[in-house]
Image (cartoon, helix red, strand yellow):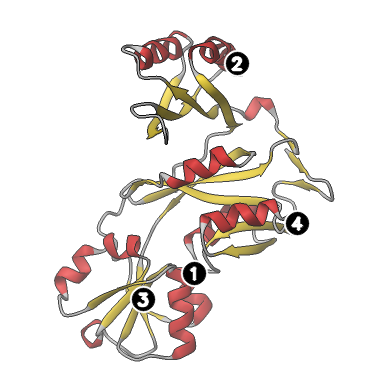
Amino acid sequence: MEIMTETRTYKLGDKDLKRIAIQGFEGSFHDIAARNHFGEAIDLEMCGTFDDLFLALDEGKADFGLMAIENSVAGTILPNYRLLREHDYAIYGEVYLRIEHQLMTLKRQTVEQLKEVRSHPMAINQCRALFNAYPYIDRVNTRDTALSAKELAQNKEPNVGVLASKRAAELYGLEIIAPSVEDNKRNFTRFLVLGEKNSIEVDEATINKASICFHLSHRAGTLAAILTVLASYQMNLSKIQSLPLIGKEWEYFIHADIEFDDLNLFEEAMKALAPMVKSFRILGRYARGEKNV
């Protein structure tokens, strides 16, 4: 599969350096997911927010973007669906990553010595058992797991711990004093791989999943009729998410992920679906990501 831009042509898996926009910093879970998908030959464009990620793509600072869309414990990152609709990029892949939170500190410290633990609020929320066991440890919310690790290494603060990835500990020379402290060991995040809409050549034989969105009016039975159409074409609805349509009370945008075995049958299903809804859009057609991670 080749991904072509105005300036360069890429092949997934080759050794060409690719510029990847991620939300977060080196050592973050976005960083790990990007390397799992594109390989080590990448140049990260590290963004503080998801809005900044799309801005980096708009300004040509990155060739591709990798963005978290849902977590098996915390649920869907709803604002990212708005970003997908507002920007004209295509989804051409997905990456599943198991999230393992490591408690790390400067060298030669113990959990009992800690006065506070810093991390992104989602990471802190996913490690409740740790804080229940050590209730005297203060929880300090930060904007990024890996950035917290980097700042601890730079500032060399004693009695401070950080929740971050194993890669972050290795990068910044911190010591893991409690491995895998996440409450749920089946904690996975799904990331979407984004690229220019008209610059992607995909081997159609590999396509077995798609993401779509549409506007649904508030009429009895509308959604049921849509689901019936999808079922009649043997489409497997793997995810459905509704979001309120701002300015139109009780009307909704629907985002859906659909899995299928026959691309032609999917195309027929979309032709049947399009007249039934408003603002219909196929956000991307791609190969299902591997979940055995």
Residue 172 pos. (x, y %) = 50, 80
Residue at disc 1, secondary structure = helix
In primary-sequence order, the first of circles 3 and 1 is: 3
Q: Which residue is mark 3?
A: 162
The one nearer the camera, 277 or 196, is 277
Q: Is residue 96 above or below residue 175?
A: above
Q: How many marks?
A: 4
Residue type marked 4: Lys
Residue at (39% x, 49% y) in the render: 188
Residue at (77% x, 56% y) in the render: 16
Instruction: Using a 10 Å C-alpha cutoff, classify the residue at mark 3 as few (fewer than 14 neighbours), some (14 to 19) or many (20 or more).
Output: many
In terms of image quadrants, where is residue 85? top right
Which-is-in-front pick, marks 3 and 4?
A: 3
Q: Is residue 30 above or below residue 269?
A: below
Which-is-in-front pick, marks 4 and 2?
A: 2
In primary-sequence order, the first of circles 4 and 1 is: 4
Tag on residue 167? 1
